[in-house]
Image (cartoon, rainbow, N blue to C red):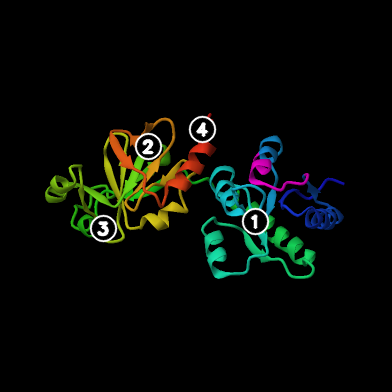
């Protein structure tokens, strides 16, 4: 009998992996081999794409299940379920940003395998329905602030589809220089946009707007986009990334963008995922 689906279990405890694997095999699912780390999971994904992933948060190595969750949702578009010991709100909300399909807490002393099986069945059914919809590869952006658009004529275009591949950066800065701040810091500083607005700049330096914060957009963008400071999300794809400057700056199109200490660890991880690097 053909398996219902192929499942990748990313779990660093061999005993728990074996228990889950046996329970899922009995339910006529095929299960990939023991996968205790993000690095090993990436190898599995390259060799055989699973239909769904069961993902622990604490894994072998420096990267966590949350890191892998971000990759699964943005690059592979594979449904995944966290199965973890962590039951705190901080971990739950961090996982929520990765657009998981479920968040299950391991019950002690035994994991409820029936709960896991039902969660898998629900996620696969939901994914089956969602795949009937066309993929989203663009943002529908405004040509100006919404308030200003209302004053335009009825024949003027107010919203345009902006493919991700054309976006160089997303920022909370306007295009107008803050002259006093620029003189004080001896570098270009710009006047801020209105609260909860972002400006999207294309390679051709065209500007479009969204009534959304950088935090809102971060979880909905493809893997090539990464937040690098309090004001900017940049596109790291090779078409727009011109290079790094002293490790702390990126040249994005014609812009020199500073990587803040807060965001630098995530930027480094993302560059490692997107590019082959040698030390």
Q: Secondary structure beneath disc 4?
A: loop
| Mark 2 crowdedness (10 Å alpha carbons): few <14, some 14-19, many ≥20 | some
Q: Which residues are magenta?
A: 33-42
Q: Tell me the residue that label 4 is attached to.
A: 275
- Dot 2: what SS? helix
Q: Nearer the viewer, mark 2 or mark 4?
A: 4
Question: Marks 1/4: CA distance?
Answer: 25 Å
- Camera-nearest residue between 73 and 183: 183
Q: Position of residue 254 (x, y in %)?
A: 28, 33
Q: Residue at x 64, y 54 (%)?
A: 80
Q: At x 26% / y 39%, what residue is drawn?
A: 206
Q: Is residue 188 left or right of residue 105?
A: left
Disc 3 or disc 2, which is closer to the eye?
2
Residue 133 seen by the camera: no
Say which residue label 3 marks: 146
Residues at badges 4 and 3 in contact (C-beta under 8 Å)? no
Q: Camera-side residue: 265 or 229?
A: 265
On the image, numbered disc 1 is attached to which residue?
A: 58
Q: Tell which tag, 1 or 4, sits nearer the viewer.
A: 1
Tag 1–tag 4 contact (CB < 8 Å): no
- Taking the spot 20% from the left edge, 56% from the top edge, the residue there is 148
Which of pointers 4 and 3 lies earlier in the amino acid sequence? 3
Q: Earlier in the sequence, mark 2 or mark 1?
A: 1
Write down the quadrant of residue 196 in the picture.
bottom left
Residue 181 % position (x, y)? 16, 50
Q: Residue at x 79, y 57 (%)?
A: 20
> Is residue 16 part of the magenta span, yes or no?
no
């Amino acid at each position: 009998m053909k398996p219902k689906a192929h499942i990748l279990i990313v779990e660093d405890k061999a005993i728990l992996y074996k228990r889950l694997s046996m329970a899922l095999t009995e339910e006529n699912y095929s299960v990939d081999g023991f996968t205790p780390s993000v690095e090993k999971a990436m190898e599995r994904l390259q060799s055989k794409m699973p239909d769904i992933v069961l993902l622990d948060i604490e894994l072998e190595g420096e990267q966590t299940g949350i890191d892998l969750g971000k990759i699964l949702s943005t690059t592979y578009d594979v449904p995944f379920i966290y199965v973890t010991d962590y039951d705190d709100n901080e971990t739950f909300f961090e996982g929520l940003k990765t657009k998981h399909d479920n968040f299950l807490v391991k019950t002690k002393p035994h994991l409820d395998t029936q709960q896991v099986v039902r969660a898998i069945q629900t996620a696969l059914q939901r994914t089956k329905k969602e795949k009937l919809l066309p993929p989203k590869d663009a943002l529908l952006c405004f040509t100006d602030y919404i308030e200003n658009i209302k004053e335009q004529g009825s024949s003027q275009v107010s919203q345009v589809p902006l493919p991700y591949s054309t976006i160089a950066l997303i920022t909370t800065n306007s295009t107008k220089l803050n002259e006093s701040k620029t003189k004080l810091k001896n570098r270009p500083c710009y006047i801020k946009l209105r609260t909860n607005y972002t400006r999207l700049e294309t390679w051709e330096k065209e500007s479009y707007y969204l009534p959304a914060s950088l935090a809102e957009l971060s979880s909905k963008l493809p893997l090539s986009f990464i937040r690098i400071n309090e004001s900017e999300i940049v596109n790291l794809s090779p078409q727009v990334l011109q290079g790094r400057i002293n490790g702390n700056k990126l040249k994005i199109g014609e812009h020199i963008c500073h990587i803040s200490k807060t965001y630098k660890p995530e930027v480094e991880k993302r560059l490692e995922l997107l590019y082959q690097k040698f030390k």
